[in-house]
């Protein structure tokens, strides 16, 4: 490809990991931490007696004894353990209107929050406030609401089990099930789809299964950036000859080859281990088609095998004993034509057939998946097709086989397990009532989209955030930013300043909390908290650094402070629980039987695994069987029918943690010093008269047009990239303005962040003024919010059974 020179855009020729990773860590540590703290801190990550890495939810090897290096884990730790501070003096110097024009990077780069702060409208500044005064104001505002359902309680998935359990207790005692949660934007299709298929909404594998599988399918996830410790697992599997098949529109370097910083020979010789044996670049949104193509091939192979006297390819014994719905699946697969499969997936038939053969020839298969699967209108269907594929050969509930959703935040799964859900099952509410003696609300509450819609429409007037950056993480910042500004009360429990905190409500409080890395001392002494990883392992985490400021409080203590000021229930002993977190764990155990002997079991190094019925081939479904679920057609997004449309996925760079921007490099994709790019196939540029390096505008199709507006990102630089024709990518959260709030998977409510139909053209040059450039994520959102009936409004998912996960 002959490309002109574009600043900050170039090829990256190296493997994932290697010296580049070590250099990146050294840089992050130098920028954020005193060098003395560095070595000791990083050594304590994911050790039996250390703290849980806030980076991701990939499990720790059982007997963590050696230091497990992870570039992005080190960035997450140094970003939290930074020596920089965002003090009251800082807030005295800068008004909120001024800070609004700072970049997301600059806001968090100021360092850790040090004092509880309250927004003062007269000076447009945050001013210090005493903790008790802050709690009293929150209590007064909450009590003033005419209906408890006018409050929204948001959780980002870093909260510990202990903090999350107290948080849900506070909200339910207050009287609502409104729990918008980062899961709603993330793995909700897993929580909704898998229980229907296999009876649990969590992954079924353990880390040990990766030692016994013959093939791993990696579908729509980017572990080199988002779960880097997984590369060590994939590398080990690759080295012993397991097949690793990737389905991803982008060639992600971590899935291609990896130089382990742990391996002296690789580091010194510059060699790397190839990861993927087969790398298939399907089109964005092409997964259902590709999976159906594979399953169709399996049926053909099965027929052929049997006709030739073989035992077949499909595991009939398993299907007969354990499942229902197979015949409907077969009928549906037979009715799905190959031309649709090929055109929607963008993958040739013989390539799909090859994948099916690899699958059929492997005794035990694990399928891993991430946001490339869940964040589509067809998110739940995507997940269920993966389950179908696995069930066809009995690849669930046996050694070396299973399904492996890669969860996002380090404790997002645990938060759900201990009660953060807008659709609580009745049995859980009965338990709460038995243990705490009050009648919890039964009516289902709001997930993230419904919460935003309620705030937008002023049906909700208070928002309490246990971490996160909700309006920035959601689609449609134009709507979400406004929604927060209309509130009576906005409370943020946070470690660092972010854009959500700059959206002032009538009463706005910013409450600084301890992070995972820090010592948490309460009346009974130093406390540990517990978290659950992607594979249902629950273990303890204890920080060791002195707190970033003496004014910080722990998340459980802050939740308790709010609770005491907002509720009148002498039966709830908030102070006693906070004095000793093992008492909170006793409460969790009392409510959830699966936490039996909780305090004892977390003393085991590595913790314990929560019972997972599907792992044991017990199917927690209405008829006690796993279910094949057919979805007719190939789920092509009808909005890309027009020939000039492209489907855009919003993705993470290597230098960010969700809305936290650590830096401007995306090393493995060859981008440095910038994020204002879109990745496009060169022929798609060509056919629009565009070239690599041109300034372009990206405009969303439909949705808002019907509401009388447009959504446009202006003046991005087009990068000719190895991505299938018709597919495009841009960074999250900057591109969120392209996505309408209601655009989501109708089953789970997860925004379709990864299938945004757009048009691409040479930039008209009418971009936002220079001084607003840092807020370009708002795009040019002009939509008429009088639009009434919006799909996805007030979603009440039925739930009469298990705890959502
Ligand atoms: N360092 C770091 N670690 C993180 C995070 C972070 O931001 N930074 N975020 C955490 C969180 S909350 C989460 S949820 C996870 C996210 O981890 P991932 O699931 O890896 O998230 P993404 O980077 O959003 O996208 C994943 C991949 O989906 C691919 N993709 C896009 N569209 C499609 C499609 O239609 N089909 C297929 N098959 N693939 C597609 C993209 O090319 C990309 O490689 O990581 C967690 N860990
Ligand atoms: N377009 C697009 N949008 C997306 C996605 C996408 O792929 N594309 N991904 C979605 C996904 S998967 C997710 S999970 C969401 C993420 O949504 P959130 O979880 O809401 O966002 P984060 O960026 O992880 O939150 C960062 C903030 O958390 C606070 N924080 C950090 N550590 C702690 C802590 O220990 N305690 C407390 N109390 N606060 C802390 C800091 O103040 C920091 O600014 O975004 C979603 N949005
Ligand atoms: Mo996530």
Image (cartoon, rainbow, N blue to C red):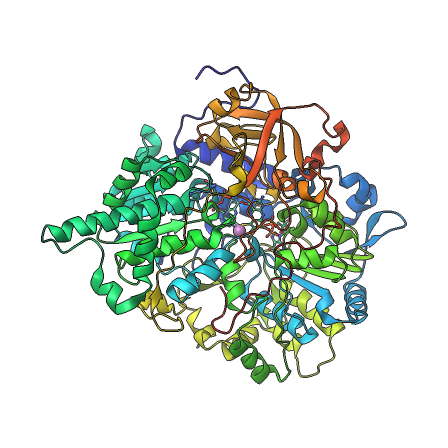
Residue drawn where x is 16% and y is 48% of the image? 304
For residue 488, side relative to residue 752 (left or right): right
Q: Nearer the viewer, residue 457 or 719?
A: 457
- In the image as oriented, which residue stretches furthest toward the right? 122
Which quadrant of the view contains residue 272?
top left
Give coordinates of residue 42: x percent, y percent.
Answer: 49, 47
Residue 52 seen by the camera: yes
| Residue 242 appears in the picture as rendered | no
* Residue 670 position (above or below residue 203): above
Quarter assignment of residue 494: bottom right
x and y percentages locating residue 411 in the rendered image = 51, 59
Most foreground residue, 313 or 207: 313
Image check: 37 left or right of 617?
right
| Number of residue marks | 0
Residue pictured at 32% horizontal, 45% vertical: 293
Q: Position of residue 732 (x, y in %)?
A: 58, 40
Q: Look at the image and tell me in which quarter the N terminus lies.
A: top left
Q: Which residue is more in the foreground, 447 or 639?
A: 639
Residue 358, given in percent of the width and then of the height, sits at: 24, 44
Compared to 373, does 162 lie above or below?
below
Frontmost residue, 37 versus 764: 764
Query: As displayed, is residue 787 above or below residue 586?
Result: above
Q: Is residue 702 left or right of residue 18?
A: right
């Amino acid at each position: 490809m002959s490309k002109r020179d574009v600043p900050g855009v170039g090829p990256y020729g190296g493997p994932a990991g290697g010296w580049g990773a070590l250099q990146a860590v050294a840089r992050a540590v130098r920028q954020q931490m005193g060098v003395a703290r560095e070595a000791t801190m990083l050594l304590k990550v994911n050790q039996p007696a250390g703290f849980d890495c806030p980076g991701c939810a990939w499990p720790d090897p059982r007997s963590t004894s050696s230091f497990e290096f992870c570039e992005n884990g080190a960035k997450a730790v140094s970003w939290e353990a930074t020596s920089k501070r965002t003090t009251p003096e800082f807030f005295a110097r800068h008004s909120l209107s001024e800070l609004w024009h700072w970049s997301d990077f600059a806001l968090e780069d100021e360092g850790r929050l040090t004092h509880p702060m309250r927004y003062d409208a007269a000076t447009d500044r945050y001013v210090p406030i005493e903790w008790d005064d802050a709690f009293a104001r929150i209590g007064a505002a909450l009590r003033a609401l005419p209906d408890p359902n006018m409050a929204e309680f948001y959780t980002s998935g870093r909260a510990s089990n202990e903090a999350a359990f107290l948080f849900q207790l506070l909200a339910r005692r207050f009287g609502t099930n409104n729990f918008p949660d980062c899961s709603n934007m993330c793995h909700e299709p897993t929580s909704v789809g898998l229980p229907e298929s296999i009876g649990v909404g969590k992954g079924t594998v353990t880390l040990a299964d990766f030692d016994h599988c013959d093939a791993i399918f990696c579908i729509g996830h980017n572990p080199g950036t988002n779960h880097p410790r997984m590369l060590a697992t994939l590398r080990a599997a690759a080295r012993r000859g397991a097949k690793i098949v990737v389905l991803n529109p982008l060639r992600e370097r971590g899935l291609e080859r990896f130089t382990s910083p742990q391996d002296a020979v690789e580091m010194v010789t510059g060699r790397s281990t190839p990861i993927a044996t087969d790398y298939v670049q399907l089109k964005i949104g092409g997964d259902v088609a590709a999976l159906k193509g594979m399953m169709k091939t399996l049926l053909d192979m099965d027929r052929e095998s049997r006709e030739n006297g073989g035992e077949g390819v499909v595991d009939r014994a398993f299907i007969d004993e354990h499942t229902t719905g197979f015949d409907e699946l077969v009928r549906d697969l037979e009715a799905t034509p190959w031309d649709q499969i090929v055109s929607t997936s963008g993958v040739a038939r013989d390539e799909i057939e090859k994948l099916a053969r690899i699958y059929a020839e492997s005794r035990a298969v694990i399928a891993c998946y991430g946001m490339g699967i869940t964040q589509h209108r067809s998110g739940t269907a995507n997940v269920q097709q993966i389950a179908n594929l696995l069930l066809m050969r009995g690849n669930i509930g046996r050694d070396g086989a299973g399904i492996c959703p890669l969860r996002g935040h380090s404790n997002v799964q645990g938060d759900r397990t201990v009660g953060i859900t807008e659709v609580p099952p009745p049995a859980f509410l009965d338990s709460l009532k038995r243990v705490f003696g009050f009648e919890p609300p039964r009516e289902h509450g709001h997930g993230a989209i419904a919460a935003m819609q309620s705030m937008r429409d002023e049906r909700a007037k208070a928002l309490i955030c246990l971490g996160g950056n909700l309006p920035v993480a959601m689609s449609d910042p134009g709507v979400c930013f406004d929604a927060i500004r209309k509130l009576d009360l906005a409370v943020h429990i946070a470690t660092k300043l972010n854009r959500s905190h700059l959206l002032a409500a009538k009463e706005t409080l910013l409450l600084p909390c301890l992070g995972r890395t820090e010592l948490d001392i309460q009346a009974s002494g130093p406390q540990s908290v517990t978290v659950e990883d992607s594979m249902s392992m629950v273990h303890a985490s204890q920080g060791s650094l002195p707190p970033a400021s003496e004014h910080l409080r722990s998340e459980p203590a802050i939740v308790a402070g709010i609770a005491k000021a907002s509720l009148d229930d002498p039966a709830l002993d908030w102070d006693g629980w906070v004095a000793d977190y093992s008492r909170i764990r006793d409460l969790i155990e009392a409510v959830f039987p699966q936490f039996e002997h909780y305090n004892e079991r977390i003393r085991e190094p590595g913790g314990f695994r929560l019972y997972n019925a599907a792992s044991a081939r017990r199917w927690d479904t209405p008829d006690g069987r796993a279910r094949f679920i057919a979805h007719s057609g190939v789920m092509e997004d009808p909005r890309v029918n027009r020939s000039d449309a492209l489907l855009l996925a919003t993705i993470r760079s290597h230098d960010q943690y969700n809305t936290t921007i650590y830096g401007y490099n995306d090393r493995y994709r060859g981008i440095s010093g910038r994020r204002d790019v879109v990745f496009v196939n060169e022929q798609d540029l060509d056919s629009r008269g565009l070239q690599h390096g041109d300034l372009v505008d990206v405009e969303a199709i439909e949705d808002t047009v019907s509401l009388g507006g447009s959504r446009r990102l202006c003046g991005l630089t087009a990068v000719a990239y190895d991505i299938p024709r018709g597919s495009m990518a841009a960074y999250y959260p900057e591109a969120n303005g392209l996505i309408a709030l209601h655009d989501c998977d109708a089953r789970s409510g997860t925004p379709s962040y990864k299938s945004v139909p757009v048009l691409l053209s040479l930039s008209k040059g009418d971009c936002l003024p220079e001084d607003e450039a840092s807020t370009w994520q708002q795009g040019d959102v002009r939509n008429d919010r009088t639009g009434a009936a919006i799909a996805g409004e007030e979603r009440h998912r039925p739930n009469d059974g298990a705890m959502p996960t």
